[in-house]
Image: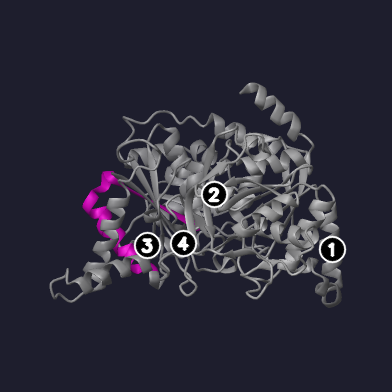
Amino acid sequence: MKYVLVTGGVVSGLGKGVTASSIGVVLKACGLRVTSIKIDPYLNTDAGTMSPFEHGEVFVLDDGGEVDLDLGNYERFLDATLTKENNITTGKIYQSVLDKERRGDYLGKTVQVVPHITDAIKDWIESVALIPVDGKQGPADVCVIELGGTVGDIESMPFIEALRQLSFSVGKDNFCLIHVSLIPVLGVVGEQKTKPTQHSVRELRALGLTPHLLACRSAQPLLDNTKEKLSQFCHVPAANILSIHDVPNIWHIPLLLRNQNAHQSILKQLDLLSIATIPDLEAWTRRAETFDNLTDSVRIAMVGKYVGLTDSYLSVVKALLHACIACSLKPSIDWIAASDLEDDSAQLTPEAHAAAWKTLRNAECVIVPGGFGDRGIGGMILAAKYARENNVPYLGICLGMQISVIEYARSVLGLERANSTEFDEQTPDPVVIFMPEGSRTHMGSTMRLGSRRTLFQTPDCLTSKLYCNPQYVDERHRHRYEVNPDVIGVLEQGGLKFVGKDETGKRMEVLELPGHPFYVGVQFHPEFKSRPGKPSAPFLGLILSARGQLEAYLSRHQKGN
């Protein structure tokens, strides 16, 4: 196995994840099979209980793993299906070592960070690197490892040491280190400053790791004299210093790497030049250029709880992007804090209330994504009602589907106190109830998680047609509450149709409202399986409907089938 390690220096948030994903794309374009691992030095065992405000969205894998959003980038860029083991955290490592210690596996030895924690990290990396993620048999050729955080952080020290040992044990032809660093420009001087990167590389070398390539983040392309200076003081050949400057969209990053012959430097370091081909990035080039040249945009109202940090809904944003590009449109997302739509905000923050409603009324379609807790629920219900009554295309995901059920029960069926037991345990009309297999006390790993099958009840429904009429689809879930099976009959008599159910027929997966241009709710999270060039069906339907193109698209594709 060949390893490419991506580390970061100077500051966090430089785009190590996108850089690591792009390296994978370029190597894959050279005919190599690629897998990836993300190391997160925090003590949580997984990302499941972390606040979206603090850490961005929780990405869900097929096997139910709740992982860092960077694994979503890997899956989208590499079109791979990763496992929960591909996300290593300090919590997982320490837990595995402590479990061994309790079992007596260490035979009475003193358990220490070195060698026991570092050995566990190495063993984990070497075993996970062998798991195929591209649907083919046998291990990949290259494993791209991203080390989260910044070099010098106390919590990442055991990982740095383990990776130093790994680089030594696998040999220099099997290990390539790429260090992502910042080249700031001071406003007064206007000069690209190399000193922060010099210090970062010095820190890395002091810990026993020497970078083979430098990926330098900057606003503008690196100047030649900046590269020469970095080469001289960081002990890296000038040809291996990559300029990762700001680009119109992130699909340009693999092209940026290819244009600077990054693949040549990596392949040479890993002794893979003899088996690699010239990188074929024609589809990537076409996609990046298509996006750059789009002029027509579609206005999408995103009504959610965590709109203060766009990374909270990163996969939803990417899925909208994939769907829009398939329709030759640019997404124009208007973020609406759900609480700003509520009646209370009219008194407390009248300007925000008026602005939120103006934005909603100007939107061509509405999406209510997933979330937990009761804050902003009233605003989401008002958004769903507005979309339903005004024939505005609506997509509710997870919580967004439950919102549409609550709104319909209240407004159409006259059940004024209809609610979810998540928000009101004493509601006389519980239309959304707690999942029976979940736990009320432990927050982590208690949900209905991962890939589950949804059976379409009729091939005539809109959603089935968008998925090209399969009998079933497998989509990823992350929730504790479900539509109450006891009220399905009443809701369907009232006009709402549940066109997708699980294999037992008791869990509602997809709802539609006949007679509405596009009013769809899905209990699963289709955004997690959306890919560039392969948009998710519900998102595609939403965008097509927003532009009045849905019927033409469906008739065209039905004839095609």
Q: Amino acid at mark 4?
A: Gly
Secondary element under disc 1, as helix, strand or loop, is helix
Q: Nearer the viewer, mark 1 or mark 4?
A: 1
Frontmost residue, 413 versus 369: 413
Q: Which residue is mark 4?
A: 9
In the rendered image, residue 180 lying in the magenta stretch gets the answer yes
Q: Give the mark, 3 or 1, whose residue is nearer the N terminus.
A: 3
Question: Residue drawn 83% across and 77% down?
Answer: 348
Q: Amino acid at mark 2?
A: Gly
Instruction: Report whether 413 appears left or right of 451.
Output: right
Frontmost residue, 535 versus 141: 535
**C-alpha gap between disc 2 and disc 1:** 42 Å
The prevailing secondary structure element of the residues shown in magenta is helix
Q: Position of residue 244 (x, y in %)?
A: 54, 48
**C-alpha gap between disc 4 and disc 3:** 9 Å
> Where does the C terminus fall, quadrant-wise?
top right
Q: Nearer the viewer, mark 2 or mark 1?
A: 2
Q: Amino acid at mark 3?
A: Leu
Stretch in magenta: 156-181
Count of residue discs: 4
- In this picture, is 185 found above or below 527? below
